Image: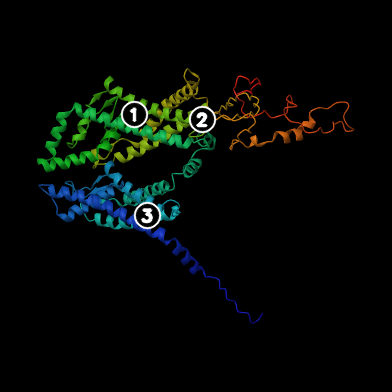
Amino acid sequence: MAGVIQTTVRRSMPASLFRRARHRSPGLASGLVGGALAAGLGLAVFTVLVMLLWVSSPYPDSGPGGALHVAAALWLLAHGAELVRVDTLSGVPAPMGVPPLLLVVVPVWLLHRAARDTAEGGARDNAPLVPGRIAWAGVVLGYLAVAAPAALYAAGGALRPSWTWTAVCVPLVAVVAAGTGVWTAYGRPSGPLEQVLGAVLPRGARHLVLGPDGRPGVAARAAAAGATVLVAGGAVLLTVSLGRHPGETRRAFGQLTEGWPGWLAVLLLCVTLLPNAAVWAAAYALGPGFLLGAGTSVTPLGAQAAPLLPPFPLLAAVPDPGAGTALHGTVAALPLTAGAVVGWFVGRGSVTGGGGFRGWTTGRTAGAAAFAAGLCGVLLALLAGLAGGPLGTAALARFGPVWWQVGLATAVWLGVTAAVTALVVRAWCLRRPYGRGGDERRPGRVVAPRRRPVLPRPALRTRLPRRTRFGRKHERGAPAPVVEDEPYLLLDHDSDDRDHGGLRDLDAGAGPVGLRPRPAPTSPATNPASPRELPDLRPRSSGPGDTEPRPPA
């Protein structure tokens, strides 16, 4: 054994790590490329938009370099980062932190799409997906690798990003949007959501929200529907208010700029801020309202006189100063409608158990409605926080709704309304199948199917040969034709009598074992009354002298 040379060498730790990285490099590399491409496309969209406005402007105040700096700053603003304007008349830097929500959709959608495509990896039907952590990390790192130089470049312009907000908002948006993309690629499983809720919710309230009956999914869909109703209703209120003040809207366009290029630029800015205004109107309908500066609130109960505001077309929809009237109080129908929609979703889901076959109890239905209202409050609080922000200093330090007030009001309004509506819908869905014309049954009730009574099986009957109308008749002594598809007609009558004729009767005069001796074979003509014989299948002649009985047809 001393001369044996060991040929198997254990790999060292660096070699093993290199081998693992080599196997994982395709997913990580595609993630890095996808993240960098998403950031580059977002910057390109903002650059093209700003350059078009700069070219069409009759009085540009900077060159192409200044327009590129503004494009990079607006791209960071779309992530929620706050910008600071340094060249003010007073010399005091003025913050600007109201991101247009329509522009926020661009980086979020690009990140979501990049992460989803990276996780799928170009897979078709049965190809394995890229591991979620690798795809997510690659997209985030690639995106931040482009965002960092863009932030450094934007710092040299007139609108400079706030480093604190930039360091928090840009990575946060990248992490969340990329995570939703990977989650979508894996089929949106409910496991991660349930784990997060299990860690956040108190132990005593987990059984009301979590469970195998699909309550988190139903509550999430109901919350999304409620938030959609609130924002859409806010857009309707905004449109109605602008229609009541058409003169102020036209005058705002004329005071801001002159000529078609300027009006087009202002109109484009108003379009990008329409989602912000819809969220402001929804906050107004919920009760907390919004702020038009420090200490100046606008609610359905009354509106305070705002300080000198810049002329802007969307601000023409602000109610006139003074106490609220009954017309202003009609906006309460919006949160009631949203609560009814949330309750309808939860009530419908409580009957089927979110796709299962067992319904929820009354307590679980009310708990799911309250949970859906809380989720909707979180969504509205997030939208309210993004829709507002500072537009300057002093009186312009705060614009828009207060996020925590909007979230709390949403949870209260929708919590009460949704719980009542969900219980009513649940009771109606459980009662309706027992009314007239209802074909459905109560979930969870198993009804045995009706079974027909089993009738005794009729005895087999032999089929007579079919007679043709114009065919030649068989003679009386001729054998009957044999049908090929019925083999039981091939039995011989004589053999049948020989095999079974001896077992017909038992009597006292039988042999020692109680059986009669086997009789001699007889023809059917001598023993016509034998009950075990097969019927004569030979065709009978229909002449006048034929008096023999015919077999039944």
Q: Position of residue 450 (x, y in %)?
A: 58, 24
Q: Residue at x 37, y 54 (%)?
A: 139
Is 49 situated left or right of 340 in this image? left
Lower position in the chain sequence, tag 1 or tag 3: 3
Is 62 left, or right, of 428 in this rendering? Answer: left
* Location of mark 3 (residue): 139
Q: Is residue 413 visible?
A: no
Q: Nearer the viewer, mark 1 or mark 3?
A: 3
Q: Which mark is residue 364?
A: 2
* Residue shown at 48% from the left, 18% from the top: 435
Amino acid at circle 1: Leu
The location of residue 229, given as percent across then percent down, is 34, 31
Query: Could you give the CA–CA distance between mark 1 and mark 2, rounded to whole angstroms?
Result: 27 Å
**Is residue 375 depicted above or below 335 in this figure?**
below
**Which residue is found at the position 25% from the left and 30% from the top?**
238
| Amino acid residing under circle 2 | Arg
Does 437 sit above or below residue 178? above
Label 1 close to label 2 by CB (< 8 Å): no
Q: Quadrant of the N terminus?
A: bottom right
**Residue at the spot 23% in from the left edge and 30% down from the top edge:** 239
Residue 70 percent across, percent down from the top left = 21, 51
Amino acid of disc 3: Val
What's the distance in space between the residues labelled 2 and 3, CA to CA? 40 Å
Task: Between residue 22 and residue 294, name the one nearer to us.
Answer: 22
Q: Which mark is residue 169?
A: none
Which residue is identified by label 1?
286
How many numbered markers are drawn?
A: 3
Q: If the image is split into quadrants, where does the C terminus sit?
A: top right
Which residue is at the far bottom?
3
Is the C-beta separation of discs 1 and 3 under 8 Å? Answer: no
